[in-house]
Amino acid sequence: CWTDQCFAGNGAADVKAVIEVQHGREPRGVVNREVLSSERWKDRLAVFAGRFGS
């Protein structure tokens, strides 16, 4: 994919994922879903949710 629309879509999806994490929510499109069940990940999400709201 080498069009402007493709690059814009990829960038928008990346930004959305960062915002989801910032608000303590799991982002879409995670390839290694096993990571999402780790205590370390859950703790990080809780910290972000407390800091930025959910």
Image: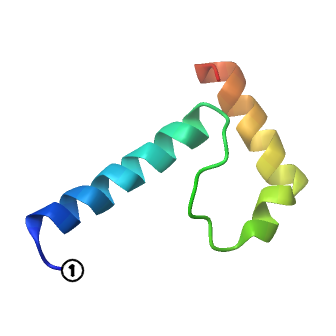
> Residue at coordinates 77% horizontally, 65% vertically from top-left?
35
Up/down of 34 relative to 13, above or below: below
Residue most toward the left? 4
Give the amino acid at mark 1: Cys
Residue 47's image quarter?
top right
Q: Can you tell which quarter of the image residue 10 is in?
A: bottom left
Of the 4 image quadrants, the one containing the N terminus is bottom left
Picture quarter with the C terminus: top right
Q: In the figure, 20 relative to 38: above or below?
A: above
Q: Please, is residue 39 above or below residue 4 in the view? A: above
Position of residue 40 in the picture relative to residue 25 (left or right): right
- Element assignment for label 1: loop
Describe residue 1's horizontal placement relative to residue 35 as left or right: left
Q: Is residue 11 above or below residue 6?
A: above
Colour pattern: rainbow
Foreground residue, 44 or 1? 1
Can you give x and y, in whole percent of width and height, for residue 32 in the image? 70, 73
Please give the name of the residue rendered at 82% of the width and 45% of the height, measured from the top-left corner: 42
Task: Give the residue number, with chain letter if any, for mark 1.
Answer: 1
Count the marks: how many? 1
Q: Residue at x 29, y 56 (%)?
A: 11
Q: Nearer the viewer, residue 50 or 26?
A: 26
Residue lying at 81% horizontally and 69% vertically, measured from the top left: 34
Residue 4 location, quadrant: bottom left
Please rate how many residues cluster around mark 1, counting C-alpha atoms within 10 Å: few if below 14, some from 14 to 19, many from 20.
Answer: few
- In this view, the residue in front, 44 or 17, is 17
Kindly give the residue lying farthest to the bottom in the view shown. Answer: 1
Q: Residue furthest right?
A: 39
Q: Where is residue 43 drawn, in percent x and y?
A: 82, 41
x and y percentages locating residue 6 in the rendered image: 21, 67
